[in-house]
Amino acid sequence: MVGNKDRLAMPRRPLLITTRQAAWLGSVFLAASLCVAAPHPATSIPDPSALQEIGKAVLDEKSAAQRHLLDEFAEHYKGQIPGILAHLTLGYSALEGKKYVEASKHFAAAGKSPSLLQDYGVYYQAVSEAALGNHAAAISLLEGFASRYPSSLLSSRAVLQLGTSLLALRRSAAAIALLQSPKLSLPEPDSTYLLAQAYQNSNQLTEAVATYRTVYYSYPASSHAKDAEKILDQLRARMGGGYPASTAEMWSIRADQLYDSGRWSDALSAYRTLAGLAGGSLLEHARVRASACQFHLGATWPALNALAALKVTEPDAAAERLYTMAAAYRRLGRRESMEQQIELLAERYPKTAWREKSLILGGNYYLLEEEYERAGGYYRKSFEEFPHGEAAAAGHWKVAWQAYRERRRADAKRLLEEHIQSFPASSQVSAALYWLGRLEEPELPAAAVRYYHRITEVFPNYYYGLLARKRLAGLPPAPANFSGTIPIDHIQRRIAGANPDAKPALNEGLYRERVRLLESAWLLDWAIGELQLVVARDASALWAGSEMARLEKERGRFHVALRYAKRYVPSYFARETSDLPFDTWELLFPRPYWDALKKQATAAKVDPYLVAGLIRQESEFDPRARSRSNARGLMQLLPSTARMMARRVPDPKARNYQLAALYVPDINMVYGTYYLKKVLDQFDGTPEYALAGYNAGENRVVQWLRQGPFEEPAEFVESIPFTETREYVQAVLRNAAVYRELYPDGK
């Protein structure tokens, strides 16, 4: 929230701007500062520092009284920064309500006076005029916009609106010239779709067809694709024999795009069309992929039968055919047939990515079947045959871990050390260090201490960092003269971030100031848009991501704030809590429902920090979250689980089960905490077992525990065969530890 009187009037930091900008900025901010200092009449207009609260009431609460007050505020500070911001807020409110005349009036007032945000007034006045059908006025406002406001995030949108208004006035030639300008960088496929409309309106039908096809074939997931398809059908009927035929290459692009985005039904249709047009290798690719789509859609036998009947000579398509058949046989539990396809891949296409994938496929199958020796054979081949492949580190870790589980001490030590040396970027390096420490601890505790210390130094907030601190608490310090050979000196903390010597690609000061001004008027959508532009143009501008997270937190969208913070705060689990400001940690580990969470956790007799860590992992504190498996709400409960818990919980508000109540945070946490308590009790209060049950089901945990004994719960966790569940358990426990460290008093 804006706190002091001159926050709107004067910039807090130097601006990196041109001399011309500095001249008019100085005059504007001087005028604003004088205005702030001036006394107000008896019917006083609020101080500029109140603008944010008024703007919030207008935009979020739709308060008519506050809108009237903001009108008076805008008039009082006419031509000055506070007044300009007020007009922008009023204009935005009117635009949201489709009151375009009112919106245009306010945006015109904001666009008349020079300011850092003049482009907003000009652009949105044009949008409002276009909505009223006054396209000539919109064109007049937007012509030359990009050259007048070269730093504006609205530049490309202004060009698109200009093109739309030109088309509305049937000035198609001007629209085509505008959209084809090599000087402009316009968003795809919006600009392409608009260009196609311009060609169509100017009766250049061949060019229109080609351009609509670009949208339909190259951007099949876009919002314009279906419209492009309809218009192409109309043009086909209109042009008759003059309509150019689509090519196999076009359908190949569309089909592959759909396949890569996981739209299996649409991809299947596209590949079938492609198969009717193509020949040679493209035809083979289409037929194999059509069957792969069937497999992904669950039609295992139809896919398998179709693949078995195919004769494929093109190497990549033939390799993909064998891999898909192996995957189908695996799903059907026909191991001999699966192995046969994997061996054929080894014999015919030994260097392809499909061969590497097949080895992981086989390894994972036998891992789940608890045939560890056979699984290890496949995993070993994965890193021996493909030492630089994507799966090499994972395969090597599986082999090293199995050696540890079988208590083959010498092999385990060698493989764990090898993993650290050969795969320094592996996500399992912290695990390798920890289990090396556990191997050494009985005979050489000083060496174990060295391993644990390095984990706490390099991976302080990782799951194994938590475990290492616990082990260190029970061990004496390593002797100062300890001289054992331990291969850990090359392991350094991994903290990604911007190059401190790199020159900023953008005028950071200018964008920071624009964001600050927009925030001060509660125009948070626009402020976040500014920051999105910054990170899109300059990947090193991590400050912009953190600012997005902060703004989303300001308006209570904690889950969105958390996602931004995760994305743009680099390597935070590799940092000590003292390395980052507490405000940043609050973005990364928020507590939006803390009082209710503590209440429900206390009632269910579970650790509130564990519940917070679980919610962060399950839903990121989004009360409306819904998973692909139909789990809902903060604690991601299946309706069947919630219905079961409703019969057991003492809270009368939660006894009457309703599906919609899963999206109510308090009710969701009642069901979730009691279910967590139930699973904890089932596994004697061991959180590792309970969390695995919460994620994968209690019956699976019972099955996995039969593979013990395990010296400690962490050994069970590392042995979980489901990657998702293993990482989930580690993440929740890690989250809980960070919550406990950040908020030790529980308040």
Image (tube, rainbow, N blue to C red):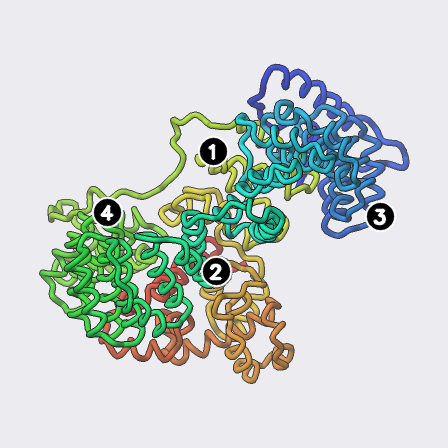
Q: Please name the amino acid that badge 4 sits on.
A: Pro
* Real-space CA distance between mark 4 and mark 1, rounded to the nearest whole angstrom: 28 Å
Q: Which residue is mark 3?
A: 65
Q: Which residue is mark 4?
A: 424
* Real-space CA distance between mark 1 and mark 3, rounded to the nearest whole angstrom: 42 Å
Helix, strand or loop at mark 1: loop
Badge 2: how crowded within 10 Å, few (<14), some, or many (20+)? some
Return the x and y of residue 62 as percentages of the image width and height: 77, 51
Looking at marks 3 and 2 on the same chain, the residue that comes earlier in the sequence is marked by: 3
* Real-space CA distance between mark 3 and mark 2, rounded to the nearest whole angstrom: 51 Å
Q: Nearer the viewer, mark 1 or mark 3?
A: 1
Q: Please name the amino acid that badge 2 sits on.
A: Asp
Q: Nearer the viewer, mark 4 or mark 1?
A: 1
Q: Are marks 4 and 1 in contact (CB under 8 Å)?
A: no
* Residue 299 placement, left or right of 88: left
Q: Residue at x 21, y 48 (%)?
A: 388
Looking at marks 4 and 1 on the same chain, the residue that comes earlier in the sequence is marked by: 4
